[in-house]
Image (spheres, rainbow, N blue to C red):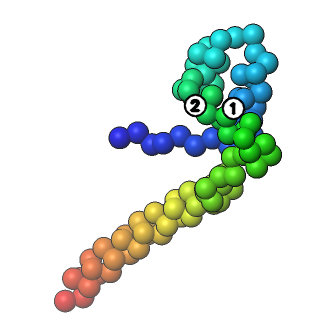
Amino acid sequence: MTKRKSFRPEFKREAVRLLETAQKSSADLARELGVRRNQLYKWKEQLGKRGAGAFPGSGRGSGSSDELSGLRKELEKVKEERDILKKAAAYFAKELK
């Protein structure tokens, strides 16, 4: 299963601008940007309907996702350290008996 891609609002606006002004076909542009062609048209439609309010996000902005991924890495490290300490404590407990 592949992870769903998410794009920043700035990227979406720039993609729509390129779609409207580009000398390339929409398929070529989509290929260059790494998105599906129909996604470009959906973004264009959303931007046309909502204007500046388009692409508000879903509460998982890039700043919070960066922080979240950092915290997850730190949690993994702490869990690994905890597991090592548990094993060491068990090893030394056996030595004392």
Secondary structure found at label 2 = helix
Secondary structure found at label 1 = helix
Residue in front for this viewpoint, 97 or 88: 88
The N terminus - image quarter: top left
- The amino acid sitting under disc 2 is Gln
Left or right: residue 42 versus residue 87 is right
Q: Residues within 10 Å of mark 2 (few under 14, many from 20)?
A: few
Query: Can you give x and y, in whole percent of width and height, for residue 66 in the image?
Result: 63, 55
Residue 88 visible from this viewpoint: no
Residue 27 visible from this viewpoint: yes
Q: Quadrant of residue 88?
A: bottom left
Query: Can you give x and y, in whole percent of width and height, for residue 26 in the image?
Result: 63, 17
Residue at screen point 51% across, 62% down: 72
- The amino acid sitting under disc 1 is Lys
Residue in front for this viewpoint, 11 or 45: 45
User: Residue most toward the bottom?
Assistant: 97
Residue in front for this viewpoint, 15 or 73: 15
Q: Which mark is residue 44?
A: 1
